[in-house]
Amino acid sequence: MKARIIAEISRFVECHQRNERTTIRWETPIVRCADAEDPLFAELKRVASQEHLLPREMLASAKTVVTFFLPFDGQVATSNIAGELASELWVVAYIETNTLITAVCEHMRGFLESSGYQVATTPATHNFDPQRLVSNWSHRHVGYIAGLGKFGLNNMLITERGCCGRIGSLVTNLRIEPDRRSVNETCLHVYDASCSKCVRRCVNAALFEDRFDRWRCHQMCLRNEEHFRAIGTADVCGKCLVGLPCSFTDPVKSKASSG
Ligand code: B12
Ligand code: SF4
Ligand code: SF4
């Protein structure tokens, strides 16, 4: 069943970009599963937020959390390197990927419900407390638990296809074999302190080696939202994700295999 779920998500993403004639393209999704009873979920009340939900608070009969990373096509990330404001393509990628994540979740709901299983979903974003800028369902923490990637100095979950992309997740009562979390780090700073390029790329003094100022980051995202209002709602920036060793790949793996 796991292979069918992975194939179904990949097939859906491929069909979506063809049928909806999206502006941006996505590479093959990475899909990973976690046991809904993994003890790390309970840790999220401490590590992320006291209000963070357990899978069974999303769906009483939860057995598995399915997480997926939708990597942007290289052009999207490259377009966002220059300048202080986000590129128009980055803005479009944000809007189109949020739509795609909702569509993937709805498609998988239909797919699983037709076999008698239940599904609970939550949007890709805008599901956060505007006062604290914290969500009660953190896709990247959930992705971390499922083995989708590891946290980088830029705060992003860095997967085997890098960090330039977006994450979705859903909870189901279908039992699926959980993936194993790799012990290997994916950020060069965490691995051997050989990099901090993302910090130097920050355009609003929000990201430092020892702290992240989410308020200053949000301020920059809102500036872009205002500037690109004609395109849609896009509180984005992402300068600390692009033009980096971790944009498209796991740089620690690349370093280890080249050295
Ligand atoms: C609120 C929010 C914001 C806010 C507040 C910042 C924030 N909290 O991260 C604002 C608007 C500023 C923001 C900005 C951005 N965001 Co945002 N945001 C979210 C949202 C909705 C919730 C995040 C949240 O509440 N997390 C819980 C809090 C407590 O944790 P945290 O802030 O993530 O910080 C944790 C990590 O740093 C972690 N950590 C660091 N090292 C380690 C090591 C270990 C072992 C562990 C366990 C944890 C850990 O510890 C911190 C506390 O637990 C999520 C969508 C979602 N629902 O998940 C997207 C999301 C996190 N954002 C995303 C992105 C891409 C961005 C931007 C690049 C904007 C853009 N699209 O252009 C910037 C990047 C800023 C940055 N460098 O962090 C993506 C991340 C994708 C990825 N590859 O990881 C997400 C997952 C959206 C998605 N569906 O893909 N965001
Ligand atoms: S740019 Fe370097 S330090 Fe920053 S997240 Fe990527 S690998 Fe880590
Ligand atoms: S998203 Fe922009 S403002 Fe926020 S930390 Fe990254 S570069 Fe800085």
Image (cartoon, rainbow, N blue to C red):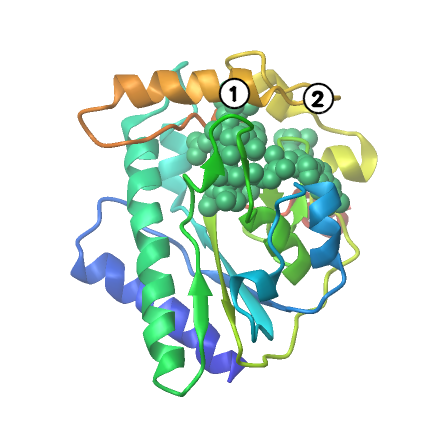
Q: Which image quadrant for residue 245?
A: top right
Mark 2 — residue? 211
The furthest residue to the right: 192
Can you give x and y, in whole percent of width and height, for residue 110 in the image? Answer: 32, 75
Q: Is residue 58 left or right of residue 103?
A: right
Asked if 188 appears above or below 80 in the picture, the reply is below
| Residue 163 in view | no
Q: Residue at x 38, y 75 (%)?
A: 8
The furthest residue to the bottom: 115
Q: Is residue 113 left or right of residue 196?
A: left
Asked if 23 appears above or below 199 in the picture, the reply is below
Q: Is residue 79 left or right of residue 209?
A: left
Mark 1 — residue? 217
Which one is nearer the viewer's eye here, 155 or 134?
A: 134
Image quarter where ligand 1 lies = top right
Q: Earlier in the sequence, mark 2 or mark 1?
A: 2
Cβ of disc 1 within 8 Å of ligand 3? Answer: yes
Q: Is the Cβ of the residue at disc 2 closer than 8 Å to that at disc 1?
A: no
The three-letter amino acid code for the residue at tag 1 is: Cys
Can you give x and y, in whole percent of width and height, for residue 187 in the image? Answer: 70, 39
Which one is nearer the viewer's eye here, 190 or 145?
A: 145
Q: Residue at x 66, y 73 (%)?
A: 178
